[in-house]
Image: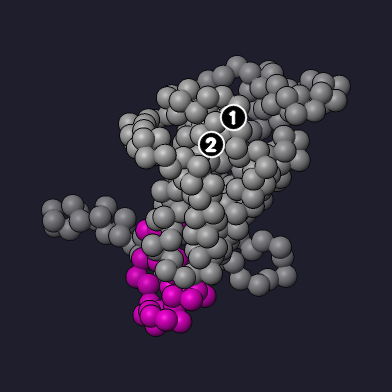
């Protein structure tokens, strides 16, 4: 009896991560959307990338940019080696092309796990080299590429699936990892915002949107207060809202609308896109229905 009780929590946890789900749509959707968003972002930065990531002519000297990076101990030896070998002029443009090729290969599912790992390493080298300019998108992209590497994303609707003829049966619910990750991220984000008085008096919302468009200063203050408090409560209560079947679809739709608003008002299009992809991948059925988004209620 004691052994049975001791095994109960483990049994519930095992059931949570092995509960049957159509992983085929999830894995394909996640792989193709992450590679697409990453490609859009790197190509959108193409004309300005030399101002952040290059040997010379940078907006801020390269040495000063990667000095505060958490990856300094890895970046410094790399850049010292490139400089000593005279490879800077080859490395900087070459790594961008290699990163784009890896993302394309990942999107079509060719050598998926290997190119996902390569894309992850190259993304870290490129974007951690100017970490003062990094924001939420860069970290979520790193995590997304890591998940594309450890998940069997090349098992369905991929060139790898045609070449290697994988066993179509998957005995692990990988979508659960994204669900737990989102719940934790939103909850702690809500706690952090809640500790900042600016989110309760509307000041944080005002500073965020006026940094992009000064015309927003004319908006009534009560709207900014409502938006700030609503954001705090929605993020903090996100885990509870998605656990409850009756509120799950409303929570997902609210998050999608919130990120669409961020995209429109703050021009953070790729950040909003990747967060919407995570929410859709985590909590929707990804099957054709009459509605735009069919949220799982099981």
Residue 116 picture quarter:
bottom left
Q: Residue at x 70, y 21 (%)?
A: 207
* Magenta span of residues: 148-173
Q: Is residue 95 shown left or right of residue 223? A: left
Q: Is residue 264 above or below residue 27?
A: above
Is residue 165 in the magenta section? yes
Q: Are marks 1 and 2 in contact (CB under 8 Å)?
A: yes
Determine whether the residue tagged by mark 1 lies in a helix, strand or loop.
loop
Viewer-closest of 92 and 252: 92
Query: Cα distance, mark 1 to mark 2?
Result: 7 Å
Q: Is residue 190 shown left or right of residue 223? A: left
Q: Around disc 1, counting alpha carbons within 10 Å, would you say few (fewer than 14), some (14 to 19), or many (20 or more)?
A: few
Which numbered tag is attached to residue 42? none
Q: Residue at x 52, y 75 (%)?
A: 157
Determine whether the residue tagged by mark 2 lies in a helix, strand or loop.
loop
Viewer-closest of 264 and 200: 264
Q: Main secondary structure of the magenta part?
A: loop
Q: Is residue 116 above or below residue 111?
A: above
Q: Residue at x 60, y 54 (%)?
A: 39
Label 2 sits on residue: 54
Q: Is residue 154 above or below residue 215?
A: below
Label 1 sits on residue: 57
Please state the horizontal and vertical placement of residue 290, each as a whole percent of the image: 72, 70
């Amino acid at each position: 009896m004691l052994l049975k009780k001791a095994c109960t929590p483990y049994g519930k946890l095992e059931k949570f991560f092995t509960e049957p789900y159509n992983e085929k749509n999830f894995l394909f959707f996640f792989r193709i959307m992450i590679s697409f968003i990453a490609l859009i972002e790197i190509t959108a930065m193409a004309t300005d990338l030399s101002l952040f990531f290059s040997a010379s002519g940078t907006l801020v000297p390269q040495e000063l940019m990667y000095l505060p990076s958490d990856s300094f101990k890895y970046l410094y030896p790399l850049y010292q080696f490139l400089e000593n070998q005279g490879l800077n002029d080859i490395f900087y443009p070459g790594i961008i092309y290699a990163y784009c090729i890896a993302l394309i290969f990942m999107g079509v599912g060719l050598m998926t796990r290997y190119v996902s790992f390569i894309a992850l390493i190259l993304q870290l080298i490129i974007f951690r080299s100017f970490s003062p300019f990094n924001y939420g998108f860069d970290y979520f992209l790193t995590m997304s590429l890591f998940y594309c590497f450890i998940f069997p994303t090349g098992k369905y609707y991929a060139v790898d699936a045609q070449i290697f003829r994988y066993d179509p049966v998957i005995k692990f619910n990988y979508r659960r990892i994204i669900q737990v990750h989102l719940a934790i991220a939103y909850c702690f984000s809500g706690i952090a915002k809640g500790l900042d008085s600016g989110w309760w008096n509307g000041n944080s919302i005002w500073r965020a949107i006026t940094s992009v468009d000064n015309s927003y200063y004319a908006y009534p203050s009560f709207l900014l207060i409502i938006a700030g408090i609503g954001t705090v409560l929605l993020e903090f209560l996100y885990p509870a809202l998605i656990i409850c079947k009756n509120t799950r679809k409303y929570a997902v739709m609210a998050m999608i609308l919130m990120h669409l608003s961020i995209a429109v008002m703050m021009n953070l299009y790729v950040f909003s896109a990747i967060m919407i992809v995570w929410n859709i991948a985590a909590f929707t059925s990804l099957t054709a229905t009459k509605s735009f988004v069919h949220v799982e209620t099981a």
